[in-house]
Amino acid sequence: MTPFSPRSGALVLSALAALACATTPEPASPPASPTPSPAGWRLLWSDEFDGPLETPIDRTKWVFDTGGGGWGNQELQTYTNRPQNARRSGDGHLVIEALREGLTGADGIPREFTSARLKTQGVFAQTYGRFEARIKVPHGQGLWPAFWMLGADIPTSGWPACGEIDIMENIGREPGTVHGTLHGPGYSGASSMGAAFSLPAGQRFADEFHEFAVEWEPGVVRWYVDGRLFQTRTPRDLPAGQRWAFDHSFFVILNVAVGGSWPGSPDATTTFPQRMLVDYVRIYGR
């Protein structure tokens, strides 16, 4: 999930929290107009995050990573499955909320920040397709929102042999830039393959919703922001002798990390809470 370090840190299970959380609905944004499937694609899986305020995350579609072990990136948050950190907004959005709060998770690790990381591992994975989400990212130094994918064989193959496709990553010190990246055996971490997409000077991704997508087909991955193609990768881009790791099933991840080796830590300019709003996730096939 980053050009500098893996996002497949050891998973630590925590007890499910059954707390109900009374919250104020998130500020409404103009809803996306109903849109037919992109030309040549058919919808296979989606979550529109509709439902009343406090409706739980759909556990038939998402599972939670939990824990505070740094996630292979020296991150500072504990991921939880609490509604304080991940919930439906009541107006059609998923909210992933990063909080500044002291918490010792079930793993016994004390942290000063909490957040959430949702994934489809074990409930949905797919080989090839168009993977798309409409997201409004948070902002601030040390924040690291992402929409990305890992190879479903990670339990047996490990990282980076399983492959990783980062559809969108943003770090707080680059408010107008997102990154799309491939990680695989021999081309991970600082040696990964990727490119950045930047808005016109002065614009921030946190100011409104944007659509992030990849189209992944045999031998090619293409990245888009708001329908604009900004990067294409094929096996010809690999370092000599390395293997293309993108020919098997992948699952999807949404998360907001706090701190880490790439974004750095929050500072005096960073305000909390910070929220990533996700209008939808849609996955298409040919």
Image (spheres, rainbow, N blue to C red):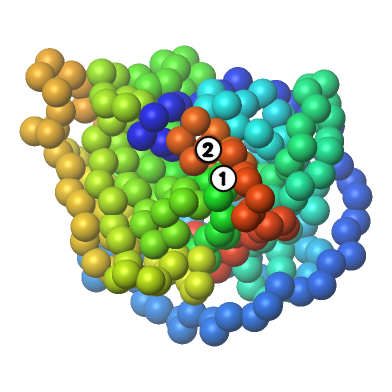
Q: What residue type is labelled 2?
A: Gly
Task: Establish if 119 lies above or below 205.
Answer: above
> Residue 113, how many percent across, how many down?
73, 41
> Residue 50, how many percent across, how many down?
65, 70
- Residue 61 appearing in the image: yes
Near mark 1 (Cα within 10 A), the count class, few <14, some 14-19 or many ≥20, is: many
**Real-space Cα distance between discs 2 and 1?**
5 Å
Q: In this view, does 24 lie to the left or right of 3?
A: right
- State the SS at label 1: loop
- Residue 123 appearing in the image: no
Residue linked to disc 1: 142
Proximity of marks 2 and 1: CB atoms separated by less than 8 Å? yes
> Residue drawn 89% across and 65% down?
22
Q: In which quarter of the image is residue 185?
A: top left
> Residue 127, how many percent across, how many down?
34, 40
Task: Establish if 239 lies above or below 26.
Answer: above
Q: In the rendered view of the protein, which quadrant contains the C terminus? A: bottom left
* View extreme (front): residue: 268
Q: Which amino acid does label 1 sit on?
A: Gly
The numbered mark, 2 or 1, whose residue comes first in the sequence reads 1
> Residue drawn 44% across and 44% down?
148
Task: Establish if 91 lies above or below 180.
Answer: below
Residue linked to disc 2: 264
